[in-house]
Image (cartoon, rainbow, N blue to C red):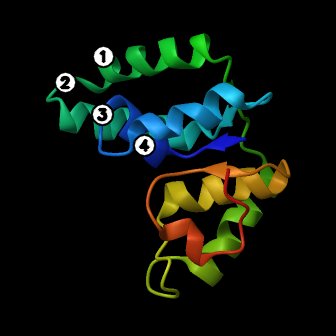
């Protein structure tokens, strides 16, 4: 499964419903995240907890190690897919209003043919398989 920044951030920030996000993470045989999603989550957690981004990133690295999450490479195909999904579902063009990080999460999930774990309704308005 591909873990979106929204799920990772919600889990670390102990948002409502975040405990339910842990079950599919634990059950998945393959776990991955886009490097942009990891960055996006570190920036969000730094803002939420008034910490330096590097400190938030260190916490996320522990999560990555604990759950053996692969940080995917972003290649040309991922970039093309992200641009295409932004054309269809991006901010200003679709009700999902996917931002840049979400477009790359969608692209990575599509490229690797894996479901996407996220929090919120943005991706439910797209054709991506939910984890």
Report the mark closest to the observer, 3 or 1: 3
Residue 130 to residue 36: above or below: below
Q: Residues within 10 Å of mark 3 (few under 14, many from 20)?
A: few
Q: CA distance from mark 1 to mark 2?
A: 7 Å
Residues under numbered marks 1 and 2 in contact, where contact means CB atoms less than 8 Å apart:
yes
Q: Position of residue 81 (x, y in %)?
A: 75, 65
Q: Kindly identify which residue carries mark 2.
A: 51
| The label number, if any, that marks residue 14 in the structure image | 3
Residue drawn where x is 31% and y is 41% of the image: 44
Q: Residues within 10 Å of mark 1 (few under 14, many from 20)?
A: few
Report the mark closest to the observer, 3 or 2: 3
| The label number, if any, that marks residue 55 in the structure image | 1
Left or right of residue 110, residue 16 in this image: left
Q: Kindly identify which residue carries mark 4.
A: 40
Q: CA distance from mark 3 to mark 1?
A: 17 Å
Q: Position of residue 98 (x, y in %)?
A: 50, 69
Which one is earlier in the sequence, the residue at label 3 or at label 4?
Answer: 3
Q: CA distance from mark 3 to mark 2?
A: 16 Å
Which one is earlier in the sequence, the residue at label 1 or at label 4?
Answer: 4
Q: CA distance from mark 1 to mark 4?
A: 14 Å
Which one is earlier in the sequence, the residue at label 3 or at label 1?
Answer: 3
Q: Nearer the viewer, residue 47 or 30?
A: 30
Which of the 4 quarters of the picture holds residue 52? top left
Residues under numbered marks 3 and 2 in contact, where contact means CB atoms less than 8 Å apart:
no
Helix or strand or loop: what does disc 4 sit on?
Answer: helix
Helix or strand or loop: what does disc 1 sit on?
Answer: helix
Which one is earlier in the sequence, the residue at label 4 or at label 2?
Answer: 4
Helix or strand or loop: what does disc 3 sit on?
Answer: loop
Report the mark closest to the observer, 3 or 4: 3
């Amino acid at each position: 499964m591909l873990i979106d920044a929204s799920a990772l951030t919600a889990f670390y920030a102990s948002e409502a419903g975040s405990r339910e996000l842990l079950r599919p993470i634990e059950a998945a045989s393959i776990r991955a995240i886009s490097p942009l999603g990891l960055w996006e989550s570190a920036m969000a957690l730094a803002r939420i907890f008034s910490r330096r981004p590097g400190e938030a990133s260190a916490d996320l690295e522990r999560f990555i190690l604990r759950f053996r999450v692969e940080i995917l490479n972003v290649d040309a195909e991922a970039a093309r897919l992200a641009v295409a999904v932004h054309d269809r579902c991006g901010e200003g063009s679709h009700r999902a209003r996917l931002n840049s990080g979400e477009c790359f999460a969608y692209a990575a999930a599509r490229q690797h043919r894996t479901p996407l774990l996220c929090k919120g309704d943005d991706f439910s308005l797209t054709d991506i398989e939910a984890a």
